[in-house]
Image: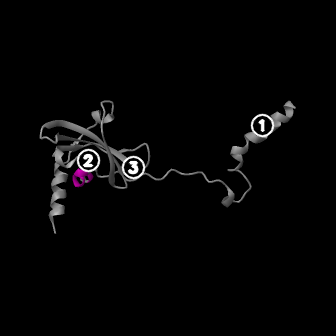
């Protein structure tokens, strides 16, 4: 009986290899799934400059907007970046510097979250967006 169980275990242990080395035609074999290709890194400065309303509320009057370099989002094929700005509250009081993590997929900001103290946005290097904001405003003002 033990020999029969050992033989069955041996036969079944090869099932994982059987499909890739089977004599079946290619069309009948299970294909290994390849991960989707990564998107090209986005131009975060231009994207944030053109879509400030995707990151900040209209009444917050963002000033001194700065962005970090994009990092690949480990949850998929998109990207993340950090955005900082001086903001004003709804009642007009300064909120100080606020930092958000933005999530970019297919060249668009699809989500944003305010960062916590343990987020790596705290240690990122930031570049000002002001030049990109001015260029974007000039582009949208042209007829």
The image's colouring method is: one colour
Secondary structure of residue under mark 3: loop
* Residues drawn in magenta: 47-53
Measure the C-alpha gap from mark 2 to mark 1: 57 Å
Q: Quadrant of the C terminus?
A: bottom left
Callout 1: 10 Å neighbours few (<14), some, many (20+)? few
Q: Position of residue 108 (x, y in %)?
A: 33, 54
| Residue tagged 1 | 9
Q: Nearer the viewer, residue 95 or 117?
A: 95
43 up-or-down from 13: above or below = below
Secondary structure of residue under mark 2: helix
Q: Position of residue 90 (x, y in %)?
A: 16, 42
Measure the C-alpha gap from mark 1 to mark 3: 43 Å
Is residue 91 left or right of 75 when viewed as pictured? left
Callout 2: 10 Å neighbours few (<14), some, many (20+)? many
Q: Residue at x 78, y 38 (%)?
A: 10
Q: Residue at x 22, y 52 (%)?
A: 49
Is residue 61 left or right of 3 when viewed as pictured? left
Q: Position of residue 123 (x, y in %)?
A: 28, 33
Q: Which is nearer the N-term, disc 2 or disc 1? A: 1
Magenta stretch: helix, strand or loop mostly = helix
| Residue tagged 2 | 55
Q: Residue furthest bottom?
A: 143
Q: Which is nearer the N-term, disc 1 or disc 3? A: 1
Secondary structure of residue under mark 1: helix
Callout 3: 10 Å neighbours few (<14), some, many (20+)? many
| Residue tagged 3 | 78
54 up-or-down from 7: above or below = below
Q: Residue at x 17, y 36 (%)?
A: 95
Closest to the camera, between mark 2 and mark 1, is: 2
Measure the C-alpha gap from mark 3 to mark 2: 17 Å
């Amino acid at each position: 009986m033990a020999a029969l169980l050992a033989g069955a275990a041996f036969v079944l242990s090869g099932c994982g290899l059987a499909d890739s080395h089977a004599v079946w035609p290619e069309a009948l074999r299970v294909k290994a799934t390849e991960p989707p290709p990564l998107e090209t890194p986005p131009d975060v400065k231009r994207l944030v400059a053109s879509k400030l309303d995707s990151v900040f509320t209209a009444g917050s009057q963002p000033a001194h907007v700065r962005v970090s370099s994009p990092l690949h989002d480990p949850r998929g094929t998109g990207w993340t970046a950090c955005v900082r700005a001086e903001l004003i509250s709804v009642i007009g009081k300064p909120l100080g510097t606020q930092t958000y993590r933005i999530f970019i997929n297919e060249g668009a900001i699809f989500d944003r979250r305010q960062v916590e103290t343990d987020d790596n946005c705290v240690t990122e290097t930031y570049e000002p967006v002001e030049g990109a904001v001015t260029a974007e405003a000039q582009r949208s003002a042209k007829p």
